[in-house]
Image (cartoon, rainbow, N blue to C red):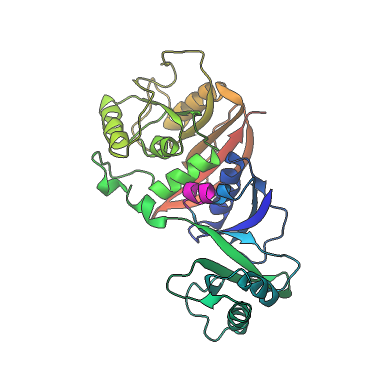
Amino acid sequence: MIPGFVEVSQESIALAEAEAVSAAEALGGQRGSVPAPMSGLIPVEVPGPDAWRQLAGRLALARRCLEVLAPSLDAESSAREQGARGGSAAFRRIGQPSGGGTDRSVLACGRAFKASGGRIDLENPSRRFWIGPAGGGPDRLLEEVATVDRAEAARRRMPLLPFRRPVSLPPRLARAAANLARVRPSDRVLDPFLGTGALLAEAGLLGGRLFGIDRDATMIRGALQNLAYLGVGAEELVVGDARTVDFTDASARFSAIVTDPPYGRSSSTGGATSSELVTAVVERWSKRLTSDGRLLVIVPAGGPPPEVSATPRFRIPVRVHRSLTREFCLYERP
C-alpha cells in the first residue's frame, strides 16, 4: 500500500473524510495509518500509483491527492533529493494555494531543488510539491499526484439538466453519497425513491448498474432523460410503490442502496406517514443487500433514522441548501 493524504474541501469536513476513506476502500485501499499533519488532510493508503488518479476521479468533496515523500527527511532535504531527478517544480504551503514568496520553508525547498539540478516553474511545472507540518517536528514534503476536477460536478447541476425540479440533491453531495455506499464498477445499485435520478446518476458514473423505483411515472421519465443526458444507462426503473413492487428478477441482491427519501412531501399512502413509509421501504430493501453491501439513506436533521436490519456506521449532518439540513446515515450488513 502507498501512503498519502487527501486534501478535502471545507463543505463538510466529516462527510469529506468519510467519502475519502470509502472511495479508497472501493479501490482496494484503506484508511491510512500515518497521522495527518494538519486539519483537512485525510490519511489514506492505495494499492498502487494509478489508484491516486482513480481516487481523484471519484471524489467530490476534495481538492487533491498527496503522496508522502521520504517521511524520514525534512522538507528541504527531500526537495534536494527530488531535484536530483531533474524536471520542473512548484512549491506551495498546504492551505495557501498561492504565494509563498515570504515562506521560509517554501523558499528553502525551491533553492534546494534548483541546487541539485531541478528548475522552478510556477506556471506549468511538471511536478507540484506541497509543504506541511509534521506533528510539531520539521516540515515534510508531499507531492501532488492527482487533482480533483471540481468543475466537473458543477456541470451536472439541476439547472443544466433537461428534467428539473426545485429540490434535488446537489451533484457533489450525491457523488459523496455514492462513494459512502462504496459503489464499484458493475455493482447493482438501488434507489427506491428515485426522484430526478441524481443519486443513481453519480452511481452510474462510478460504473454501477442502476435500478430505481418511483410512484410517479413522470419522475421515472424525467430521471431517464437526465441519465441519458449524462451518458448513463439504467438497467431497470419501475413505476410503483417501493413497499410492494419488485424488479424482473425478484431474488436479485444489491451491493448498494442510496436514497434521499421525500420527507415532508406528500408521499404517504394507505394512512402511513412519510416517516413510516420510508422506514418500511428501507427495511424491506436492506434485506436484499449483499453480504458486504451498504445502505446510505439521507434523513431530516434531528429526526429518528430508519430502523433497519443493518449495522449503523455513522450519521453526519450536512447543510444541503441554505435552510435545509440533512443527515447522511450509513449502514452495513451485519
Does residue 57 appear to the left or right of 331 in the view shown? left
Residue occupying the point 49% across, 29% down: 186
Quadrant in the picture for residue 236: top left
* Image mark count: 0
Counting from the top left corner in percent of width and height, residue 308 is at: 58, 28
Does residue 84 appear to the left or right of 231 in the view shown? right
Counting from the top left corner in percent of width and height, residue 43 is at: 65, 56
**Toward the viewer: 205 or 111?**
111
Counting from the top left corner in percent of width and height, residue 196 is at: 32, 36
Is the magenta region chiefly helix, strand or loop?
helix
Quadrant in the picture for residue 274: top left
Residue farthest to the left?
162
Counting from the top left corner in percent of width and height, residue 24 is at: 59, 45
Report the quarter where the C terminus lies.
top right
Residue occupying the point 67% across, 66% down: 37
User: Would you place residue 288 above or below residue 155 in this image?
Assistant: above
Residue 16 part of the magenta segment:
no
**Toward the viewer: 83 or 311?**
83
**Toward the viewer: 125 or 227?**
125
Residue occupying the point 42% across, 22% down: 242
Residue range in magenta is 53-60
Residue occupying the point 51% across, 29% down: 187
Residue farthest to the bottom?
102
